[in-house]
Image: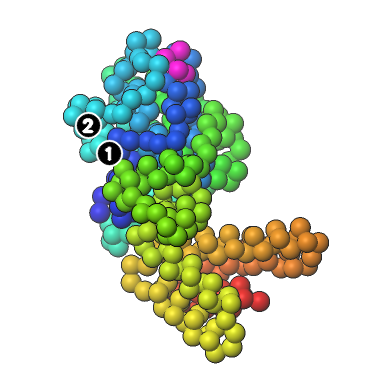
């Protein structure tokens, strides 16, 4: 597994190789016009929910800049990359000397993606700029996502953002910008992307060879994915719809029936190669608890609202501890499910 393909879902196309983007024409036009003006910001914070096209937009804009190094003669709009051009081929293969993609690295020993972007990865940016400083070309760094920077890495990035090299462009991606260092946010120009509408989501899935076939399944995917292509792929290709149904059974059942349902679900979520669907379940459970807290608050039942909100933080803490100490995942899941049923 290469770092360029690590974390890519089944049925998805790595953003560096994806020639199509749906639903973000306004953002594309803004970036193109800003670049052409010659007054564009050196750091763009591209923010929005996970899986809606932020990374694809970043690589698409990087391709535009490197294909048109003189802003004054660049088109005022972005076009689909020419996959046969030398710029596009270099970007797609990760071989561009003018583009650096910072993401969570792959652990060489385990073959798994590490849990954070470390300061060692950020040092690559310093080396990248020193190696290309005499070329006069644009140098672009995509941080994907900045949410994964650990504290030391975030501080190291901040130093570069405070004194950016000449003709440097940072495309900083974030699913949750409120969690970033305020000083990083203040050094960037914010560009917020919205979740995809149903039509654009359907087009994106069809473009990936996973067309929606109508009926109740399509309705469920559109509703549960919340405008995210990655969520839709988890529902369609990773058994996400079955996980949701199994969780609903756990919530609705009582006594021994509930216990059996909990064990069946925990077995699936703790099985081999279950990382993607386990993460999907945690997101769904978090949303479920937050919705219960919100509904309780709206009904004036503040004790219940507080209890449900606390369950979210307790769940996060349990998962963090279980991962840090390599505890039995099935038992952790059973504990979480038991708490969620109360």
Magenta-highlighted residues: 33-37
Location of residue 317 in the rendering, given as x and y in whole percent from the top left corner: 58, 66
In the rendered image, which residue does mark 1 sit on? 17
Q: Which mark is residue 138?
A: none
Q: Tell me what residue is drawn at x 59 percent, y 63 percent.
A: 288
Q: Farthest right residue?
A: 300
The secondary structure type at the circle numbered 2 is loop
Q: Are marks 2 and 1 in contact (CB under 8 Å)?
A: yes
Q: Residue furthest top?
A: 72
Rendered-image quadrant of the N terminus: bottom left
Q: For residue 201, what is the image quadrant?
A: top left
In the image, which disc is placed on residue 83? 2
Of labels 2 and 1, earlier in sequence is 1
Query: Relative to residue 110, is residue 96 depicted above or below?
Result: above
Q: Where in the figure is residue 55, as x and y percent of width and height?
A: 40, 39
Q: Is residue 202 above or below residue 79?
A: below
| Front-most of residues 136 and 174 | 174
């Amino acid at each position: 597994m290469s770092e360029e393909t690590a974390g890519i879902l089944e049925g998805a196309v790595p953003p560096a190789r994806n020639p199509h983007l749906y639903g973000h024409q306004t953002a594309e036009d803004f970036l193109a016009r800003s670049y052409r003006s010659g007054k564009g910001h050196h750091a763009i914070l591209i923010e929005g929910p996970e899986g809606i096209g932020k990374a694809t937009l970043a690589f698409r804009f990087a391709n535009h800049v490197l294909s048109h190094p003189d802003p004054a003669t660049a088109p005022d709009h972005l076009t689909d990359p020419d996959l046969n051009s030398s710029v596009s081929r270099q970007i797609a293969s990760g071989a561009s000397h003018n583009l650096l993609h910072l993401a969570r690295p792959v652990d060489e020993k385990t073959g798994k993606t590490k849990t954070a972007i470390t300061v060692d990865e950020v040092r690559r940016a310093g080396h990248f700029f020193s190696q290309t400083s005499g070329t006069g070309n644009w140098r672009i760094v995509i941080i994907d996502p900045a949410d994964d920077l650990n504290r030391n890495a975030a501080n190291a990035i901040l130093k570069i953002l405070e004194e950016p090299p000449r003709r440097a462009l940072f495309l900083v991606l974030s699913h949750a910008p409120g969690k970033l260092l305020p000083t990083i946010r203040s050094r960037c120009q914010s560009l917020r992307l919205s979740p995809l509408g149903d039509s654009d989501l359907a087009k994106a899935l069809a473009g990936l060879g996973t067309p929606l076939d109508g009926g109740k399944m399509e309705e469920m995917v559109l509703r549960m994915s919340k405008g995210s292509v990655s969520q839709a792929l988890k529902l369609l290709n990773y058994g996400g719809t079955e996980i949701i149904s199994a969780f609903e059974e756990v919530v609705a059942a009582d006594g021994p029936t509930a216990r059996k349902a909990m064990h069946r679900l925990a077995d699936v979520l703790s099985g081999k190669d279950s990382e993607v669907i386990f993460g999907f379940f945690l997101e769904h459970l978090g949303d479920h608890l937050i919705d219960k807290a919100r509904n309780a608050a709206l009904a004036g039942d503040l004790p219940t609202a507080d209890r449900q909100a606390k369950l979210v933080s307790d769940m996060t803490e349990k998962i963090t501890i279980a991962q840090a100490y390599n505890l039995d995942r099935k038992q952790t899941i059973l504990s979480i499910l038991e708490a969620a049923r109360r």
